[in-house]
Image (tube, rainbow, N blue to C red):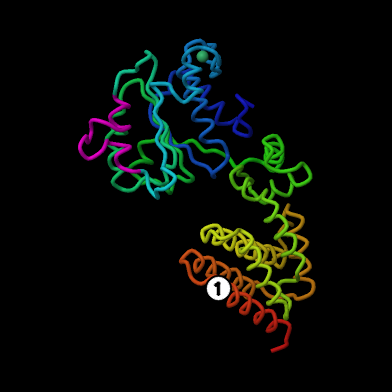
């Protein structure tokens, strides 16, 4: 483990070798799921590259020099960061090439070309690079084509396919792995995200992402999940209790419509997970590490049987409902229609229709 960064030793080793052989300048595209440490690593790497007191080639910043202190406080004049503002859906062009009245005289693409203030390098971290629009990506491209000397540009993205081919081809790809359930469970407890008794369950649900673990650790969600898997959801006659449970979970989010939508998305997403697990069980795939989900899937197959195709249709039906939630359709109607369809399908398979 390097500088408290868990589960990314391969990436650390890659940069250590780059540093020793002097291949650390240029553009890097960090890809991997949200919440696996890409941003933390980028900022720590920036600190290490700006620190002039660290042991040569060790990649370890000293932690107490002026450069380290400035970098840690987010105030280093040679460390530039850009991220999507919380209230925007894209990275504004002005952050990259300056406001309209000052195009190309401000913004990251201009600033990265300036001489390092403190004599080392200029480093830019572009967070949320998935949210670059085409205009922004093209503006950035000019800088990537001719990166200023002694500059390092790091783009953070959830997948290489989220970037324009022109950006990809000018960057060196660095892959971040999802965190292992063991690492994630430890982090979840260390950071106070979940209680030790819930850590394993949260870690499995979060599928390698600390960000998803934060969502999963919410007690209401864990409780909803427990109740959902306790209902034999695909049994005929249970569609009303299922609808009630989903709607109560959504309403538990309070008055904020966005929060309620979020919960419905999670709740219906869980139903889709359940049907997927049922498909895996039917197909004889190895059991899911998620014991709760696995138990529910095995029980469903045992009591109801079913065939892959009809269960796949139920997954599709859930995804359709999630799309309706995203489109802001009437929530009660979405849930009732969904549960009704699921109930019909269950009845059909049980030979009751
Ligand atoms: Zn230092």
Residue 37 is covered by the magenta coloring: no
User: Viewer-proximal residue, 216 or 135?
Assistant: 216
Which image quadrant for residue 140? top left
Q: Quadrant of residue 99?
A: top left
Tell me which segment is drawn in magenta: 92-113
**In the image, residue 224 lies at what x, y percent?**
70, 60
The local crowd at label 1, few if under 14, some if 14 to 19, many if 20 or more residues have their Cα within 10 Å, is: some
User: Which residue is identified by label 1?
Assistant: 334
Dividing the picture into quarters, in which one does residue 278 lie? bottom right
Q: Give the residue drawn at x 28%, y 29%.
A: 110
Q: CB of residue at label 1: within 8 Å of ligand 1? A: no
- Residue at coordinates 49% horizontally, 35% vertically from top-left? 174
Report whether 153 appears left or right of 214. Answer: left
Residue nearer the viewer, 127 or 25: 127
Tally the numbered discs.
1
Residue at the location (68% across, 75% down)? 307
Q: Position of residue 350 (x, y in %)?
A: 73, 82
Apparent side of residue 169 relative to residue 342 in the rendered image (left or right): left
User: Where does residue 178 sit, x and y in percent of width and height?
Assistant: 60, 42
Q: Is residue 26 above or below residue 170?
A: above
């Amino acid at each position: 483990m390097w500088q408290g960064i868990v589960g990314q030793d391969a990436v650390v080793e890659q940069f250590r070798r780059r540093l020793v052989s002097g291949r650390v300048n240029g553009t890097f595209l960090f890809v991997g799921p949200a919440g696996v440490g890409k941003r933390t690593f980028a900022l720590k790497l920036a600190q290490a590259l700006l620190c002039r007191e660290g042991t040569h080639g060790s990649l370890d910043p000293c932690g107490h020099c002026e450069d380290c202190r400035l970098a840690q406080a987010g105030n280093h004049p040679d460390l530039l960061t850009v991220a999507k503002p919380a209230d925007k859906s894209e990275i504004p062009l002005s952050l990259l090439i300056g406001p309209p009245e000052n195009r190309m005289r401000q913004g990251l693409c201009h600033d990265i070309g300036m001489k390092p203030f403190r004599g080392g390098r200029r480093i830019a971290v572009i967070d949320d690079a998935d949210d670059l629009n085409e205009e922004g990506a093209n503006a950035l491209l000019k800088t990537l084509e001719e990166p200023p000397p002694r500059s390092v540009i790091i783009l953070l993205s959830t997948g290489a396919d989220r970037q324009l081919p022109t950006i990809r081809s000018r960057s060196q790809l660095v892959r971040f792995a999802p965190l292992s359930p063991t690492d994630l469970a430890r982090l979840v407890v260390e950071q106070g995200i979940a209680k030790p008794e819930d850590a394993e369950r949260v870690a499995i649900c979060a599928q390698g992402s600390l960000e998803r673990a934060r969502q999963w650790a919410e007690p209401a969600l864990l409780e909803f999940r427990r109740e959902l898997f306790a209902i034999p959801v695909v049994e005929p006659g249970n569609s009303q209790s299922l609808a009630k449970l989903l709607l109560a979970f959504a309403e538990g989010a309070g008055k904020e419509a966005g929060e309620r939508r979020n919960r419905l998305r999670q709740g219906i997403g869980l139903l889709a997970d359940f049907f997927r697990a049922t498909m895996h069980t039917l197909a004889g795939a190895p059991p899911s590490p998620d014991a709760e989900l696995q138990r529910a899937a095995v029980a469903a197959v045992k009591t109801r049987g079913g065939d892959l195709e009809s269960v796949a249709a139920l997954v599709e039906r859930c995804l359709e409902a999630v799309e309706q939630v995203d489109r802001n359709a009437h929530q009660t109607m979405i849930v009732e229609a969904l549960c009704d369809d699921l109930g019909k399908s269950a009845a059909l398979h049980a030979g009751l229709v």
